[in-house]
Image (spheres, coloured by chain):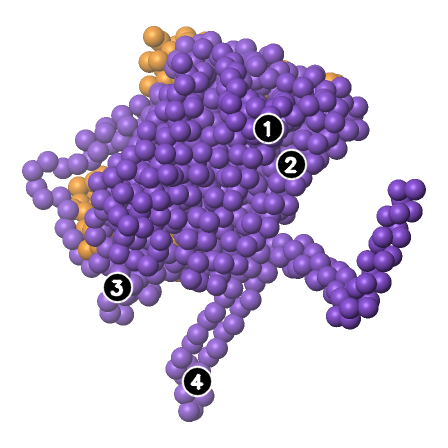
Chain colours: A purple, B orange
Amino acid sequence: MAIDFALAAVLAALGSSLVSTAAHKVPSVLRYLAFPLLAVSGAAATVAGFMVMGNGEVLVTTLPVGLPWLEWQIRVDVLSALFLTIIGIVTFAVAIFGPGYVREYEHGQHPLAQLGIFTGLFITGMLLVVMANDAFLFMIAWELMSLSSYFLVMFHHEQAANRRAGFLYLLMAHVGGLAILLGYGVLATFGDGFSFDAMRAAPLTPLWASVAFALTFVGFGMKAGLVPLHAWLPEAHPVAPSHISALMSGVMLKVAIYGFIRVTLDLIGDVHWGWGVVALLIGSISALLGVLYALQQNDLKRLLAYSSIENIGIIFLALGMALVFLGTGLPKLGAIALVAALFHTFNHAIFKSLLFLGAGNIVQRTHEQNLERMGGLLTRLPYTGFFFLIGCMSIAALPPFNGFASEWLTFQAALQAAELKNGVLRALIPFTAAMLALTGALALACFVKAYGVAFLGQPRSRRVRHARKTAYGMRFAQGLLATICVLAGVFPNVVVNLLDTIPRMLTGTGLQSATTQGWLWLTPVAPGVASYSAPLVLVGILVTWLIAWWFSHPRGARSVRRGPAWDCGFGPLGPTMQYTSTSFAMPIRRIFAPVWGIEEKIERQVDEYGLRVSRLSHQQRVYDRSWAALYEPIARWVQFAARRVSRLQQGNIRVYIAYSFFTLLLLLWVIS
Amino acid sequence: MTGWLLALVQLALFVLGAPLLVIWVKRVKCFLQNRRAPSMLQPYRDLGKLFRKQVVLAENASQLFRMAPYIVFAAMVLAAFTVPLIAIQLPTAAIADMLVLVGFLAIGRFFITLAGMDVGTAFGGMGSSREVSLSAFAEPAMLMVIFTLAMTAQSTNLSSVMQYLIDVGLVLRPSLMFALLGMLLVAVAETGRVPVDNPATHLELTMVHEAMILEYSGRHLAMMEWAAQLKLMIFGALVVNIFFPWGLATEFTLVAIAIGIAAMIIKLAVLGVVLALSETVLAKMRVFRVPEYLNLAFLLALLGALSHIILEVGV
């Protein structure tokens, strides 16, 4: 039953892709047919995911396509089910958001057919990745996902920067794909077959297991955007249309997490704690650098993309902790850390999609993507403003929203590090927890900046001042995701209970006591050690708010008078006098200065007497250090090698004949 | 039932007593600086005056600006709800642990900084920018202190931590000494006292908290002020009750509670004197020196955690 829903989801996504081919003749087919089909696909995937997670079954089937001796094998277990749910929910929201969003493209020069076809294929690819039960289908689906998203990144290809971003994305996706392929190669050699069942049974020596882990970590880490392999992500995600950015940041990165968990914990199985240390360190560095870079962005969508790097870092931090605990024989703690990682994966998918849809709403209404030109949008787009606020509160990990619940679980797992035998590990885990704390505080700063500059204050440009209300579908999609953020945060027990089946399946041990105290209390380790009651927190805040409001609010008389803001007696306050995005982040830029490459240019003109500054201009560019440190040397080396190789090309026919002759000789010698 | 009742009594003491701590510090400072002190009732008179006054809102203030004072106040009240003041092992202790307490403080900060940016004056943005930058250092330091305590007592629950420290008695542990020093530095920074911020001035070069609430008036301002006073009380209670947990009522009898209240008053009064002394001796720092100060706090807290892991685990 559930597997039928899952396959129906794949078919509906494919169907959406097919019907979109008609869009170059009839543009409205995208709105009336392609997006509804995507919604069906999303709903079916969500239903399938919930059904499987509910009863914990493992469903296997074979599709009559593929290689003659290896038909496509499909397997849906609880781990796949979680990711099916994530893909399903976000796809559903995007499908509702989409029609309102693409309306403006219908009169533009952009080919709508391309958008529809590749969106459908992209979702098909992601669904198949999480359902694959053999490496062959996995890689086909993976490439389908990467390639179709490349065309979506290139949608606005008339700008050179976008073409560059698209090329970089394609290149990195393939280097990563190659690493994954090699990792599967190791497993397939030992396991004697491409199917996951054979790989699971593979007798790996510790050395080869580590090689397989390293390859998959690099491959999936590249797709997920771990530092220092992240450079493509902030280039590619913001340039796609916003609902695609939501799918890429919200879902595609999660598919990489899925691959990592599937290969490491399921296929390799026998984890070594050293792998956990690697994931822990890389994860905490990614989290910290991701949020620091996010803080310095002025482009709203770029800021969100960097924040995805941060959250992927947090997920890998928790996963690394799970590997350390599992590798040292503490499966109960490993289960807590794994559930924390999966919970954060789910949460990030929801709130990042919500924020990207909100950003898309702003972009569509104002045609501005730069924070420095926004402001005052809360009064102009009240619904978007409200939902975006919920997204910001979730991502900044404020109780009782969902981001807090998963970070709280991560901290609880970290605090159990005292049970480890190894003294270095015992010190390392609290230290990474401190990094996580720093990341959390900086994330709050980052989203206060994003929200404060975009939605509060006075509008900084004309188009933002005249922003008008949005389509109902776009509002509804954001409202849906915001509701899930609140529900998952207020009832974390329900989510944790569903997620608990995953460590049970992978390691045989689940959470012992997380929800034993009833639906009101979350107690991951034991009731005496730590407890958190999100419903009571929410009730407490609302009751206190109401009481405070009731007692302080005077009845009868008009209690509020409007007046101009205090301008220090210098005349009216203009929008340019506000704190900007750049100036807001300035103290942190100064404190952490070595992290970024900063170019600052200040030009001042003085009047003829040299007394008064008549004109002042300030330009600043913050760029990613990983370019100069890692990518440019590699690019230079490749070019150098290419020049060396190109010396073979003499352009002289006799030289080429000589090459052929010597090649023949060599081959004859090899054969004989 | 008695437990819930006692929790409500404790909360009432917290909320209604918060202005007293502030005026006590102010009076001690006045004494130290040879000034005439205001009456102990002055903060209540100020709050009452603000509650009666009409609110003047800036023309472009949004709904968020009007909601923020209530949310900030509610967050602080909930934070106070989780901190034991006179008794431990209350039934409310299980609702939220120390990590959630940090979360409540973060809610307050989130909304106060957004409110600062809402009107669109340079002052508000400046205060918000400084507040989030400084707290980005204070919050990890505080969490590090919490980790040390949690690992020592095997629990993140404040009540259990205090129970543990009462049970083992006064042992001079290096980890707790470092944690106490770190916590004191964080408390001064988080509550906006000298040398990090000065609640008594409106000097634009240095102010943080006052800059954010500059546009508030009437009952909104009263809420914000009261929330700030609550925050000082929360940090005071944290410092004295974690590191000096003597006198806390562990059973719900009248005698125990009377002792708890008396102990709380004495401990907070002593802490107030210490705070007033340090504020009289120290001068306000430059804003960009504050991160160094907070790094010191973080380093102390980290040393506390490390010395716990290296010296104390398994001993």
Residue with the mark numbered 4: A606
Residue with the mark numbered 3: A462
Q: Are both tags, 4 and 2, on one chain?
A: yes
Chain-order first, disc 1 or disc 4: 1
Q: Quadrant for the C terminus of chain A, please.
A: top right
Residue type for callout 2: Ile
Q: In which chain is the residue bearing label 4?
A: A
Asked which secondary structure carries label 3, the reply is helix
Q: How many neighbours does mark 2 have within 10 angstroms: few (below 14), some (14-19), or many (20 or more)? A: many
Residue type for callout 1: Leu
The image's mark for residue A371 is none
Asked which secondary structure carries label 2, the reply is helix
The image's mark for residue A180 is 2
Single out the residue that lies furthest toward the left. A556
Say whether residue A1 is left or right of residue A591. Answer: left
Disc 1 from disc 3: Cα separation: 59 Å
Q: Are both tags, 2 and 1, on one chain?
A: yes
Residue type for callout 3: Arg
Q: How many neighbours does mark 3 have within 10 angstroms: few (below 14), some (14-19), or many (20 or more)? A: few
* Residue at 37% across, 30% down: A12
Residue with the mark numbered 1: A67
The quarter of the displayed image where residue A617 is located: bottom left
Disc 4 from disc 2: Cα separation: 60 Å
Residue type for callout 4: Val
Asked which secondary structure carries label 1, the reply is strand
